[in-house]
Image: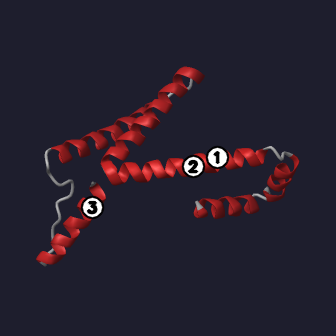
Amino acid sequence: SAFSTVLSLITLIHNKELSLAISFVYRHSEIHLHFFMFSICSTIGQLCIFYTIKNFGAVVFTIIMTTRILLSIVLSCILYDHQVTGMGFLGLVVVMGAVCYRIKRKAEGKHLVKWQGIQDEKAMELVQEWHEHIDT
């Protein structure tokens, strides 16, 4: 969140829109409630993300987020008559294929990555443990 704030500030300064944004906030005091609600929702969203990854793993979280994005695209196409280009559709298929492949490999109990070139047994255990920690 701090990075996002700094990046937004830099962008506003670079585009010479910082004074416009500040004057908008002063003119429309009701925006403070919106800022507060946005912050609350963002915090709750982050807590849900942490909870999901901790209890169900990164793969489940990836599936949830990918499904959410796909539903968002479908709703956008239905409600606003937006079109998905052939390249966009190909991108969706590639992403879903990669997620499904990862699920399949994990369900089979196979490692997604086969580590090669590590001679030290302790180093190999450390790399496997690190990778499994990220993957669960």
Amino acid bearing label 1: Phe
How many neighbours does mark 1 have within 10 angstroms: few (below 14), some (14-19), or many (20 or more)? few
Q: Which quadrant does the C terminus fall into?
A: bottom left
Q: Is residue 96 above or below residue 26?
A: above
Amino acid bearing label 3: His
Name which of mark 3 and mark 2 comes first in the sequence.
2
| Residue 114 place in picture, x, y as percent | 17, 60
Badge 3 marks a residue whose secondary structure is helix
Rendered residue at 22%/69% (across/down): 127
Q: Which mark is residue 38?
A: 1
Rounded to the nearest whole Å, what is the CA distance between mark 3 and mark 2?
A: 26 Å
Badge 1 marks a residue whose secondary structure is helix
Rendered residue at 19%/65% (across/down): 128
How many neighbours does mark 2 have within 10 angstroms: few (below 14), some (14-19), or many (20 or more)? few
Q: Colour scheme in the image? A: secondary structure
| Residue 93 place in picture, x, y as percent | 35, 35
Q: Is residue 100 above or below residue 3?
A: above
Q: Which quadrant does the N terminus fall into?
A: bottom right
How many neighbours does mark 3 have within 10 angstroms: few (below 14), some (14-19), or many (20 or more)? few
Rounded to the nearest whole Å, what is the CA distance between mark 1 and mark 3?
A: 32 Å
Badge 2 marks a residue whose secondary structure is helix
Residue wearing tag 3: 133
Residue 10, quarter of picture: bottom right
- For this view, does 75 lie left or right of residue 55? right
Task: Say if mark 2 contacts mark 1, CB within 8 Å.
Answer: yes
Residue wearing tag 2: 42
